[in-house]
Image (cartoon, grey):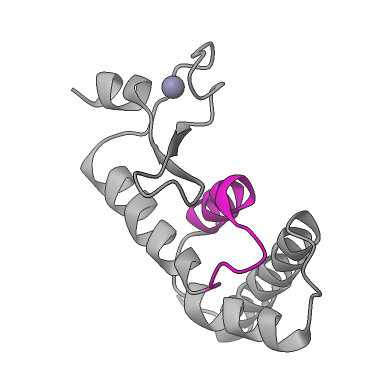
Amino acid sequence: MIDSSDSKQKQEAQAELIRARAEMLCDAVSRRYTDSIGDLCVRILAGYDLDVIKEAFNKAELVFDRFTEFNKLREYCETIAGIRRGADRHVDEDCSLCRGTGWKLMRRSDDTGDMAISCECRKRKMA
Ligand SMILES: [Zn+2]
């Protein structure tokens, strides 16, 4: 049985978390948080699992700078959800490359900063 008020509550809780994480992310990159950023994040992240959204924000906090488009969060969710669909996500918590996050930073080839890529320890466990 589907209780629609229950799922609405879930949606609201999810939107609240997304806004809170968006605000933290703005803080982390010294960008001013506005409601429209919160709304944008809620809109682009709707439909993803909470775990996926949290991980996308974890990744964003590593790689975002103040000029990064928030739309990137959806890209991260796609990648993370894809990895989860493909295999159980297990990372090596003692991994020295990613310190157990499953993401490691790599210098971009055009030297415009770092990007996060899926760590070998995750690939190893998936294999
Ligand atoms: Zn690792």
* Residue 11 position within the rendered picture, expressed as x and y whole percent measured from the top left: 61, 77
Residue name at image x 73 percent, y 58 percent: 29
* Residue 73 position within the rendered picture, expressed as x and y whole percent measured from the top left: 49, 65
Q: Is residue 60 magenta?
A: yes
- Ligand 1 sits in quadrant: top left
The quarter in which the N terminus is drawn is bottom left
* Residue 83 position within the rendered picture, expressed as x and y whole percent measured from the top left: 30, 44
Q: What stretch is highlighted in magenta?
A: 51-70
Q: Is residue 84 magenta?
A: no
The quarter in which the C terminus is drawn is top left
* Residue 23 position within the rendered picture, expressed as x and y whole percent measured from the top left: 77, 67
Residue name at image x 44 percent, y 73 percent: 47
Residue name at image x 66 percent, y 68 percent: 18
| Residue closest to the far left | 127
Residue name at image x 59 percent, y 78 percent: 42
Q: Which of 29 and 102 is in front in this view?
A: 29
